[in-house]
Image (cartoon, rainbow, N blue to C red):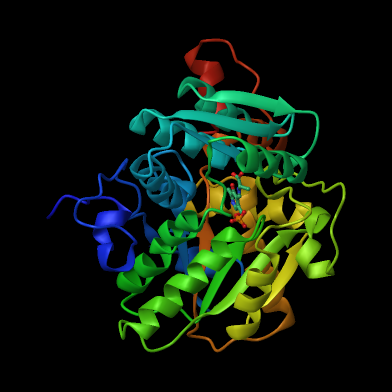
Amino acid sequence: MEKWPGVIRAFKEFMPVSEESEVVTLEEGNTPLIHVPELAGELGLKLELYLKFDGANPTGSFKDRGMTLAVTKAREEGSQAIICASTGNTSAAAAAYGARAGLKSIVLVPAGNIALGKLAQALIHGAEVIPIEGNFDRALELVREICSRYPVTLVNSLNPYRIEGQKSAAFEICHQLGRPPEILAIPVGNAGNITAYWQGFQEYKTAGRIDSLPEMWGFEAAGAAAITRDRVIAEPETVASAIRIGNPVSWEKAVEAARQSAGLIEEVSDSEILEAYRELASLTGIFAEPASAASLAGVKKMTREKSLPEDSRVVCVLTGHGLKDPNTAFQEILQPEPVEASLERVVERAGI
Ligand code: F0G
């Protein structure tokens, strides 16, 4: 088997790079597409269910797919520093790829509202971490303003190279399934990823690699459901901190992806997200972060409301690893009390 070269080289005909480009990569991509008939059965879903586990990327989220290209280009263009606003994962990826490229990274995060693992990543990779007394939407406004005045490169998904890199996940799914799925279910925050997937599927169709397109099903958290409710949410709230965004940058593009694909943008409640989060972990062995579980929660919700052909292939995108956010896991599942270190007590507790 050939060594996986990372998403830029793996899909170079579809990437805006030349042979001379010095690629900054952590060999991201090529993540598992896991068939989970037992989960579908347990949930009473009569469809072919798959999980695209992008938590298996080097920094534990799909952001690596776009960051490899954004940072490659930043370095190629002679930039000395990259900057982003983030609910956590983008900051972790920017910090890691910045370290790999030898660039300074600056990350603005909402103080007190990013998961512990993500903060640890940004710090250990040596980013300048600036927690702000405001939410993600405010952090992004500040970052845009800074980029208009100072010589730093923006690596949020407003940077088109982020989207170009992230579309690689759509390509991988087509190869892994042997064809596109009928439905692609995905969490929506700032709406960059749904935009990227839709672009990827369309490019593969135009290139003659596939001959159909999936319906794009995007799911927002109910407390941050700007697109679903068609209004900016000034103070978004959700347990899924990664998608706690009230004014998504790629709003129109997400609406277009749903419209053009005959798909939908819907919302799921925090309790639906947390239920799907626990089911994924306990029924499939996959630990995804709460925001990721919005895709499965959404499929469960929508299949109650509309019926699909039984053999429909549905791919739920799991965008980030559960280890990013240990606190939510502990809030959901109580930590066990210690027992006396004796055979009797341990066997009693084990229930064997
Ligand atoms: N899932 C996870 C785990 C995320 O971190 C994000 C976004 C999304 C889903 C939503 O993707 O924004 O492209 O619609 N996280 C960004 C960040 C905002 O800063 O890490 P989107």
Q: Is residue 215 above or below residue 74?
A: below
Q: Is residue 13 left or right of residue 185?
A: left
Residue in the picture at 25% in, 59% down = 10
Question: Residue 41 sits in which quadrant?
Answer: bottom right
Q: Is residue 279 left or right of residue 7?
A: right
Where does residue 6 sit, x and y in percent of width and height?
A: 28, 50
Q: Is residue 86 visible?
A: no
Q: Which corner quadrant holds the N terminus?
A: bottom left
Where does residue 160 sit, x and y in percent of width and height?
A: 50, 58
Q: Residue furthest top?
A: 341
Residue in the picture at 47% in, 84% down = 213
Q: Residue furthest front?
A: 149
Question: Residue 132 sits in which quadrant?
Answer: top right
Where does residue 166 sit, x and y in percent of width and height?
A: 45, 58
**Residue closest to the eye, 6 or 115:** 6
Residue in the picture at 34% in, 61% down = 16
Q: Is residue 213 left or right of residue 31?
A: right
**Residue closest to the eye, 241 or 151:** 151
**Residue closest to the eye, 175 or 249:** 249
Where does residue 65 sit, x and y in percent of width and height?
A: 41, 52
Q: How many marks?
A: 0
Q: Is residue 334 visible?
A: yes
